[in-house]
Each structure stands twice: as structure tokens, then as C-alpha cells.
Amino acid sequence: MQTNVEKIFSFIDQEATFIEEQESAPYLEGIVYALELWLEEKKKPDLVNPKKEEIRKAIQLGILKGMNRSTQVNHQMTPDAIGLLLSYFVKEMNKDKKELSFLDPALGTGNLLYTLMNVLPNSSHAFGVEIDELLIQLAAQVGELLEQDIQLFRQDAIRPLMIDPVDIVVSDLPVGYYPDEETSKDYFLHTEDEMPYAHHLFMEQAMKHVKPGGYLYFLVPASIFESKQAAQLHKFIKENGWIQAVIQLPGSIFKNKAQEKSLLILQKKGENLQAPREVLLAKVPSMTNREAMELFFQKIDIWQEQNNR
Ligand code: SAM
């Protein structure tokens, strides 16, 4: 008997392949078509008590297949291994809060954000910003199927955002230069001698949209503090928040060294709040090594307890 994940994937794959072959349209557009049929109840997979994570995982498999065929460089999804690791941090660091609101200013397909929202019992609502029309369409459909309370904005996230401050920002940031000088000129992290980094501007924008004391979880280039613009970034962080942790992710998750990322955790300054006692600097071991992963999580728990004393 097929599992729910298998049934959903077969349904999506069949419809997307049909669109790809009959209409010569990209497979990813075929997924939008399949999800539309499902949402409008015109055709849908025959499921038995599907769980949110089953739906997310199965659609993710379809999107991964579509992205492997896509030629667009921004068509990238945050791998599940990273999403699950990140949820551990978010859960541990926000246990005391009854409700959590989220913002992902580089939402993509929403896979990272939905992984977190599905896992965290106290997640309430979220905002997502994405510039790519196809990706935000997928994110909207998946959000609806998962019954997540999310408001989406299709726009350049560096431009002004009409979003109330949230408890948590989480984002796998787009990496590279940001070309629109008119938009970036009012940013502290704007640079005169070369184009500013998009990932730096995203951090500044996110800091504006998080509540005092709120946490920001960013996936950033592993070499972020070695660039020419790093001194300015340090200055920005020091004035507005605190670095809580810098966690190097295992190289095996990424296609090559240049694409390697780290998890940078910041906290926005707020009244009666203090800098962390200790900044966590850690390296995630190979995720297939169970014992090493258990030790890693123990280390995080100890750090978390000491910081909360
Ligand atoms: N976490 C996402 C997921 O799981 O699907 C993947 C995020 S991907 C690494 C970065 C995203 O940022 C891409 O989808 C890209 O289209 C988007 N992006 C790039 N520049 C942007 C901008 N100026 N404003 C909004 N989104 C942007």
C-alpha cells in the first residue's frame, strides 16, 4: 500500500509531467497546476489522515525534481536537514513564548518557514516576502494546503515593507550584490565604493521588522565575516543587537565550497535585556553521525541553560 507521501508525490508528478509534455511548460509550472486542481477539489490524491509534514515533504520532493530541471539560479530550496536543525534552535530559544509570529523576507517556496511552523507548537502566524512570481505562487498554495496562517508579499524585500514587527525572523538569504542603488542608499549597510551585499541589506531590513528582544536566524555565506564589507556589518550588529551564535554547517550539505553556509543567530536589543553570557561558536558534525549529533545538541542545551540563568 502506498503511503500518503507516495500518493501525493505520484499525483503531483503525474500532473506536472502531463503539463511539461503537452504544453511544453516547465515542470514547476506543472506543480502549480497540480496544486490548483487539488485546492479547487477538481482532482486530488486519495489520502488517509494526512499530516502537515507528510504534505510538505511530498510537495517538496516534487519541487526538488522541478528545480533540478530549472535553469533559473534563484530556484533553490532550503534543504530539510537545515530546516530541522534550525527548528531545534528556534524551539529551544523560544520555549517560554505562548505564540510566535514569523517573517521570512526571502521566502522562496516557503519550505524553510513551513518546516518550522509545522514543528513548533506555538507558531501563530507568518509573513513571507518573495520577488519571484512562480515561487511565491507555490508558497501560497503550499501554505493553503498546510492551513498555515501566512500573509504573502510579492516584492523586492529591500524596498519598504508593510509588515508589523514579528517575534522571529528566519531566512535563507540570497547571496550576492544588490544592484538598485536608489533603494539601498538609505541603508546603514549601503556602500560607496562597491555595490552593497544583498544578504547584508536583508539583515538590516529584517532587524527593522523584529520586536525588541526577538531573534533572527539567518543562513549566510560561511565566509560572511571575512569580506571587505564585514567591518560595517559588525558595526551594524553591535549597534542594533547581539550575536547569539555562529554555527558552521557541514560542507556535505552543499554542492561546493563557495556555496557553504553558516547559521547566524542574532537578537535585537531591547530594554532590560543583556548581551548573551557566551556566544555559541560551533560546528555541526556530519548529520548521519548520530552520536556526534547527540553531543552537539547537548552542547546547545548547556549553552542555552547558561544563557538563561
Ligand atoms: N528558504 C527558501 C525555500 O525553502 O524555498 C529558499 C530561499 S532562496 C535561498 C532565496 C530566495 O530569495 C529566492 O527565492 C529568491 O528569489 C529570493 N530573493 C532574491 N532577491 C530578493 C529580493 N530582493 N526580494 C525578495 N526576494 C528575493
Image: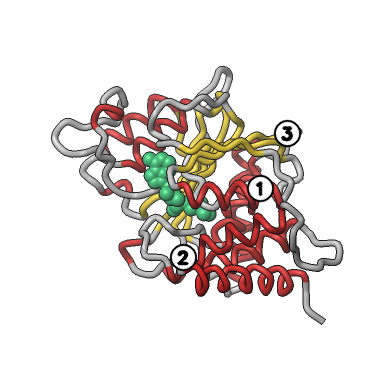
Q: In what quadrant of the picture does the N terminus appear?
A: bottom right
Badge 1: how crowded within 10 Å, few (<14), some, or many (20+)? many
State yes or no: discs 3 and 2 in contact (Cβ < 8 Å): no
As rendered, which of 267 and 221 lies closer to the eye? 221
Badge 2: how crowded within 10 Å, few (<14), some, or many (20+)? some
**Residue, far right:** 49
State yes or no: discs 1 and 3 in contact (Cβ < 8 Å): no
Residue sitting at x 55%, y 64%: 30
Label 3 amino acid?
Answer: Glu
Label 1 secondary element: helix
For disc 1, the marked residue is: 143
Q: Which mark is residue 99?
A: 3
Q: Position of residue 216 (x, y in %)?
A: 52, 38
* Quadrant of the rendered image containing residue 76: bottom left
* Quadrant of the rendered image containing residue 198: top left
Q: Is residue 253 visible?
A: yes
Vertical side of 304 occupied by 17: above or below: below
State yes or no: discs 2 and 1 in contact (Cβ < 8 Å): no
* Quadrant of the rendered image containing residue 38: bottom right
Q: Earlier in the sequence, mark 1 or mark 3?
A: 3
**Residue, far top:** 271
Q: Earlier in the sequence, mark 2 or mark 1?
A: 2
Vertical side of 90 occupied by 55: above or below: below
Label 1 amino acid?
Answer: Gly
Label 2 secondary element: loop
**Residue, far left:** 193
Q: Nearer the viewer, mark 3 or mark 2?
A: 2
Residue sitting at x 38%, y 48%: 174
